[in-house]
Image (cartoon, helix red, strand yellow):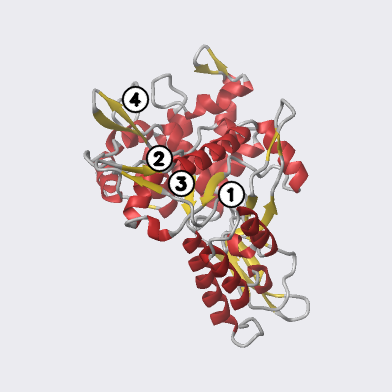
Amino acid sequence: MANRDDLLVAIQEIFGSEIVVSSRAAAALLEAGSVFELFKAKIAIISDLEIFSHTIACSPACADILLRNGIDLMQLPRIKKFQEHDTVEIRAPFSSLVRSLFTDQFLNFGQLNSSGKLVLDSGFLAETDLFISCLEAGRSGILPTRAAKTILDPLGMVDHGFVTNEGELLLEAMESDCRAIGAIDPSHSSQQFLLFLDEEGMFRVRPFGANAIGVMDEPRLPQGPFLFRGGTLQSYSAGGDFSLEVLAELEELINSERTRENDLQLYFKRNPEVLAGLDFGDVHSQPILFKDDGSKLIPDFFLEKVDPGWDAILDLKKPDVDIIVRRKNRNYFSQWIQNAIAQLQFYREWFENPSNCRDLEARLGLPGRIFRPKMILVAGRRSSFESEIERIRLVSNQSDRLEFWTYDDVLARARRYRDFLCGHVGNRGRQK
């Protein structure tokens, strides 16, 4: 299993000195990777293309550079995570990856390339360095360095495996833009706020930074208190109503044997904040996904992320459904749960078509922001799992970007949010 110590050792080995790695760069490197089996041996593989995808996912500034230059993010590979394995300790080949990204692979083989020299000089490796190094390394025809050609090929800027002159100019422009981020705002990886006086002499707080990772929910927020969630500063009222009555109704529903899926659908439609929590904004009930053959898919909910990216499709099943089948040598999800996961897979395949995403964006009023949403299944009770480790192992064997919530998880999370919100507003009439 990949870990930060392996990563830091590999980086020090390549650069010959200690390099500080930003949290986002570390996340991009640690989260990327695939595991495949060869002659019964499990082997970890990391490519620059997966690093590139994860860098974009954790850095809005880098993603914005691609979008401004006409690059379709849908063409990048879906993001995957390493999976836990019981019998083999998997070690990601960080040394070979870092070497391929930051050293010359041709005339001056093994010596630091231009990106590597900049990292060594600064003593700091940021996500922008990963972005630039993936573009530089990806111009070669040698695997696994292929990020540049992946984004240029649909633009007609790759000829017989080689980047064209026009493609080289575009890559240089994007690299220049990326370097400018750090020059303009060295702390662009951090959450930043600007405190200022408005025209009425009132102090105001506004998210600030070159990558615009923080935004205002409204041009001018009412008087506090405020929430900062998902990179968005909002008024407290956006947190929803986590009243005791609302939570008690949910508890009654999940404890009753008479509860139907439709009862839960109607409850969450009336109380969307219980599903949204502090991670999501608007919750759309039963969006229609039209298929080319005239048929349609109707998931229970579409959860809109507060900040663009990683929205979610969510389906509900009953609280008393059997989750796990237990056998002497192995445990696995019940057929009921496997069918539910298969249904989520149908939704995922629908979102793989960019035109489908554009259609749903238009109908929900979300232009240009739906990009491979994650899938969430809500079913059963927490007591069905012997431990959290068992849950992680069972879920990790399923499709990428699948989350499994029990109804106890939903209720416990809502209670935590209520404690947090009420604890910060005092006696403001929300403690009912």
User: For residue 47, which numbered disc appears in the image?
Assistant: none
Disc 3 residue crowd, few under 14, some 14–19, many 20+, Cα 10 Å: many
Identify the residue under disc 4: 105
Look at the numbered disc 3 and give the secondary structure of its residue: helix
User: Mark 1 or 4 closer to N-term?
Assistant: 4
Q: Report if the CB atoms under discs 1 and 3 are less than 8 Å apart.
A: no
Identify the residue under disc 3: 127
User: Mark 1 or 3 closer to N-term?
Assistant: 3
Between tags 3 and 2, which lies in front? 2
- For the residue marked with disc 3, what is the amino acid? Glu
x then y, percent, for residue 228 = 58, 67
| Residue 86 falls left or right of residue 113 | left
- Residue 123 makes an appearance in the image: no
Q: Residue at x 71, y 37 (%)?
A: 358
**Position of the C terminus by quadrant:** bottom right
x then y, percent, for residue 383 = 39, 60
57 vs 70, nearest the viewer: 57
Look at the numbered disc 2 and give the secondary structure of its residue: loop
Identify the residue under disc 1: 314
- For the residue marked with disc 2, what is the amino acid? Ala
